[in-house]
Image (cartoon, rainbow, N blue to C red):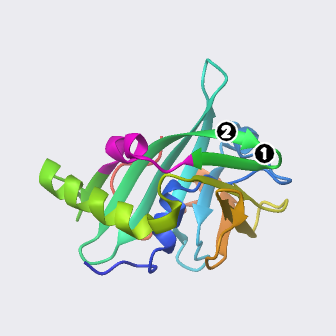
Amino acid sequence: MEDIMAGLSVILAFAASGSGGVDPVSLSAKGFIECAQPDESSKTCEGMATYVRQPDGSIMSVDQFVISKQPQVVVHSRTKVTLRGQSMCHMNEDVALARASFVIAGAAATEEEARSWRQWQKERLGIMYENEVCSSYPAGLKLVVVLTSIGGMPAVSDPIAIRWVRPDEGFKLVSEQAGEPLE
């Protein structure tokens, strides 16, 4: 299974974006969608996310990310996130991974396929698994770079470009077969 971004999308799939100058919950409430690794010319994103405040006050990150090109695999997840200072944080753990669903080449994954992709993601997450992962980024709607930490220490990873987009701008996941639109 060839992954698109050598683990970057896996980081994104379970790394909620932060609030260091940008309030993702407010932007999502105003209709903005977080577009990860945007390609302006093709109007595509390697991942898309929104943040929803729940009735109990908690925040849910609703994500979809392309994690493999061949076969094309999209992971859909909902993860509870919390504010820690200027960052949004969450735990990468079995409960969250068990709730994730997968779309392979445009069709829902079988339970066996989903189990295989969950194991693949768990292995790719490495040190990020069972640790708190926090993300924050500077203010700006157009293009910002996400800075992450794992277990309170700076993460060693490639920068993650984020752009906040509106649905009417026409941005989509990298492939037309990416599954259902973000809710």
Q: Position of residue 61 (x, y in %)?
A: 56, 43
The amino acid type, in three-letter code, at marker 2 is Thr
Q: Quadrant of the N terminus?
A: bottom left
Q: Which residue is mark 1?
A: 23
Q: Which residue is mark 2?
A: 82
Q: Where, by quadrant of the figure, is residue 153 drawn? A: bottom right
Q: Position of residue 127 (x, y in %)?
A: 51, 65
What separation in Å lies between label 1 and label 2 (alpha carbons)?
A: 13 Å
As helix, strand or loop, the secondary structure at mark 1 comes to loop
The amino acid type, in three-letter code, at marker 1 is Asp
Q: Nearer the viewer, residue 55 or 120?
A: 120
* Residue 155: image tag: none
Which residue is painted at 28% across and 70% down in the image?
Answer: 72
Asked if 174 appears above or below 47 in the picture, the reply is: below
- Stretch in magenta: 91-101
Is 130 on the left-hand or right-hand side of 76?
A: right
Asked if 46 appears above or below 18 in the picture, the reply is: below
As helix, strand or loop, the secondary structure at mark 2 comes to strand
- The question of residue 97 being in magenta is answered with yes
Asked if 15 appears above or below 159 in the picture, the reply is: above
Q: Where, by quadrant of the figure, is residue 152 drawn? A: bottom right
Q: Nearer the viewer, residue 80 or 154?
A: 154
Asked whether the beta carbons under mark 1 and mark 2 sit within 8 Å of each other, the answer is no
Which residue is painted at 53% across and 57% down in the image?
Answer: 48
Q: Position of residue 151 (x, y in %)?
A: 64, 56
Q: Position of residue 57 (x, y in %)?
A: 67, 23
Q: Residues within 10 Å of mark 2 (few under 14, many from 20)?
A: some
